[in-house]
Amino acid sequence: MVGVNQDWPVTELDPVRRMRVLAAAAPGVAYAEKLIPAPFSAVWETASDLEHELPRMVTDLRSFEITSVRGERMTGHARGRLGQRARFDVVLRPGWCVMQSRFLIGGMAAVPEGEGTRFAFLGGLRLPGIRLLDPVLRPAIRPLARRPISRLEHRLQAR
Amino acid sequence: MAPMTAPPEIDPALVRAAQRGDRMAVADLLDALAPYVGRVCGPIALQDGPDAAQEALIVIFRNLGGLREPGAIYGWARAIAVREAVRVARRTARAIPAELADVPAPGDPQLAADIRDVLARLTPEHRAVLVLRDLEGLDEQAAGALLAVPAATVRSRLSRARHSFRKAWSG
């Protein structure tokens, strides 16, 4: 039994699986994922360019500006199409992005899969009592998470 | 075997913030717990480890509000992870263990190279017992309580699991 301890198998949870956990645990969020036929580096380079690409993916956004950066933690200011503003806390690292304002939550995750990239998108509301609406809300808002992924795919094709 | 290295401490304030619905805190807590849950699920669920860890973490975060004492989070998460890992491993046809007689002879190069091969010859419950006792350092009473079986059953499972190991590793 010598040297067994160091060799016990360990499971690593990739960013997309972590995003599934976040989505399953957060009431009132839209979640979707898709295998995009483009390499991880290209997908993540585009998706993680929040200031330029986030308003293209989420069309309710007019602009998103990073206002401070501390390692993988950032602060951003979002402005909506109707003029609404929100301050977002952001965590951004390769394959993983989570952001939260007072009323909204968003997330993206990506992992290489075959020759492509599995990409996940999460978006939703943080409101008191939303847990009660979750069973009704979740299927209804799923398309809201599919659309940003489609827009990202078109963007990648255009490049 | 010595118990595994203690996981890093988790700030109780982070747990409470996650319980209040702060999603950044949930994401940070997920970062903190995922490696630990992966270490528990890996040796029990083997190739199904990622599914087991994902499902365990979903149960953990859906029920986080029910955790009264943030300082007990690892023990609480461990109980969920072990149960989910056994459940996921039993769900698959691959969980049918080989007979003890099928364990390769001592000195077989594949054993020296790959402990997974040895673990794969045990039932998920045997692997759970080994993880709790030899990696997590639990006594038979505590392991039995967590697996909802009497300590005597843990002892016999452990004895069988150890016997398999001994057969594979000594010689």
Image (spheres, grey):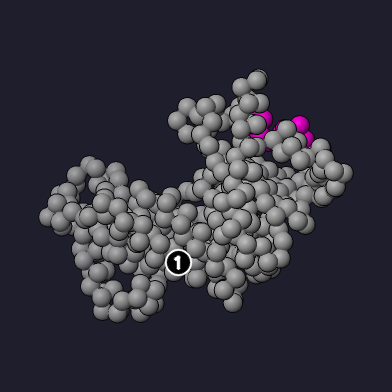
Q: Report if residue A50 lies within the magenta region.
A: yes
Q: Report if residue A142 lies within the magenta region.
A: no
| Residue at the spot of label 1 | B80
Residue A140 lies left or right of residue A74; in this view the side is left
Residue span colored magenta: A44-53
Check the image and report above or below for B71 versus A1. Answer: below
- Amino acid on which the number 1 mark rests in the picture: Ile
Q: Classify the position of the C terminus of chain A by image quarter.
A: top right
Residue B100 lies left or right of residue B161; in this view the side is left
Furthest residue toward right? A83
Image point (85%, 48%), residue name: A85
Q: Main secondary structure of the magenta part?
A: helix
Viewer-proximal residue, B119 or A92? A92
Is residue A2 in view?
A: no
Image point (45%, 30%), residue name: A114
Is residue A148 in view?
A: yes
Residue B62 spot, x, y in % from top left: 55, 64
Q: Classify the position of the N terminus of chain A by image quarter.
A: bottom left
Residue A13 spot, x, y in % from top left: 49, 49
Q: Chain of mark 1?
A: B
Q: How many marks?
A: 1
Residue A119 location, quadrant: top right
Residue A10 spot, x, y in % from top left: 42, 51
Image point (61%, 29%), residue name: A153
Image point (41%, 55%), residue name: B52
